[in-house]
């Protein structure tokens, strides 16, 4: 069959099933009855002559054919957006949409340093902003669910182009009254006797820290592990532990004087970086290019401790 014969509504339902993992979740997402989505899926599978999702007790799992169809659907949506934006520009208007995924630690800086000035210059552009771990941001970029990603210590990926990056060494984040807060530099061995507050393993920060501890033969004692930088910062500010983050990620509490950032003496930790990413081969729309122009200098300002 010709893929162009698949209507947009059916592709939207397939994407919703893929993202939600079930017919019920897809129905809630696209506001269509579950029975109607099930019928669309069955009809499409019959037309393709192939199963798109395997049924399990925990939900639906996409087949390789579904994965390929989802990639096609997202690229088709992107090309449609690109055409609509270019037509709008030729008519003398400015509209369009941009979707961005960022690590949580970048959120405050992106809102203040990027989105506020961007919308002052491009008020007609709609921006969708989401947060996630390094792995989640990279997956969103690779799957074309977002136009641009900003993540910490992102590993190389052939499907992703790095548009800009900047050094972002990890620091020890300490309550202001902590006995180690009077030092200007600390080693990982200096932290070893103290309980730590760390992000979980999905985050680039944690993976880099664990690698450094392995290289330096340091056994870290983790008191609290979480996936929220905001919760981690508040926990540290309350005097309950020591954290390890790039300095920019602790900026709200640093500005309030509740915590102090101390440099860590580790070659590996000093290799941490902020990376601005785009899917390889993806042609950015004019609004995406405009947002990248705002993001590029911001990435460099986030980078340095």
Image (cartoon, rainbow, N blue to C red):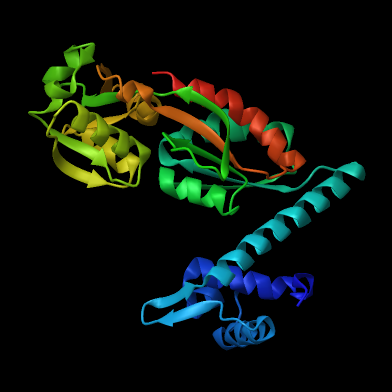
Using the rendered view, name the quadrant where residue 191 is placed.
Answer: top left
Q: Position of residue 291 (x, y in %)?
A: 66, 35
Q: Is residue 68 visible?
A: yes
Based on the displayed image, in which of its 4 quarters is residue 58 positioned?
Answer: bottom left
Q: Position of residue 154 (x, y in %)?
A: 44, 37
In this view, 5 is above or below 85? below
Q: Is residue 12 left or right of residue 202?
A: right
Q: Residue at x 30, y 38 (%)?
A: 207
Q: Residue at x 33, y 35 (%)?
A: 205
Q: Judge whether residue 237 can be spotted in this image.
A: no
275 sits to left or right of 86: left
Lateral position of residue 151 relative to residue 52, left or right? left
Relative to residue 215, is residue 287 depicted above or below?
A: below
Place of residue 36 in the rendered image (x, y in percent of width and height, measured from the top left): 62, 86
Percent position of residue 141, x then y: 56, 48
Residue shown at 14%/35% (left/top)? 220
Residue placed most toward the observer, 49 or 284: 49
**Quarter the C terminus occupies:** top left
As drawn, is 51 to the left or to the right of 172?
right
Task: Give the residue at the far right of this rendering.
Answer: 91
**Quadrant into which the N terminus falls:** bottom right
């Amino acid at each position: 069959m010709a893929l162009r014969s698949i209507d947009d509504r059916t592709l939207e339902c397939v994407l919703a099933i893929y993202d939600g993992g079930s017919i019920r979740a897809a129905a809630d997402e696209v506001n269509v009855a579950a029975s109607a989505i099930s019928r669309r899926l069955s009809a499409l599978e019959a037309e393709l002559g192939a199963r798109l999702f395997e049924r399990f007790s925990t939900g639906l799992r996409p087949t390789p054919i579904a994965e390929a169809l989802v990639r096609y659907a997202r690229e088709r949506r992107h090309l449609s957006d690109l055409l609509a934006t270019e037509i709008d520009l030729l008519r003398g208007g400015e509209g369009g949409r941009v979707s961005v995924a960022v690590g949580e630690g970048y959120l405050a800086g992106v809102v203040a340093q990027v989105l506020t000035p961007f919308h002052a210059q491009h008020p007609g552009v709609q921006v969708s902003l989401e947060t996630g771990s390094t792995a989640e941001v990279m997956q969103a970029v690779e799957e074309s669910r977002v136009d641009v990603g900003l993540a910490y210590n992102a590993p190389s990926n052939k499907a992703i182009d790095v548009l800009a990056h900047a050094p972002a060494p990890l620091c020890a984040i300490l309550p202001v009254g902590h006995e180690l807060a009077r030092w200007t530099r600390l080693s990982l061995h200096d932290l070893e006797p103290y309980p730590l507050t760390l992000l979980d393993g999905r985050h680039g920060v944690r993976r880099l820290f664990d690698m450094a501890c392995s290289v330096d033969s340091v056994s870290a004692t983790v008191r609290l592990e979480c996936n929220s930088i905001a919760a981690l910062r508040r926990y540290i500010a309350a005097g309950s532990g020591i954290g390890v983050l790039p300095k920019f990620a602790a900026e709200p509490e640093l500005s309030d004087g509740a915590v102090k950032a101390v440099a860590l003496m580790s070659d590996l930790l000093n290799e941490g970086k902020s990376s601005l990413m785009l899917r390889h081969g993806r042609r950015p729309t004019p609004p995406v290019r405009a947002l990248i122009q705002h993001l590029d200098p911001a990435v460099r300002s986030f980078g340095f401790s």
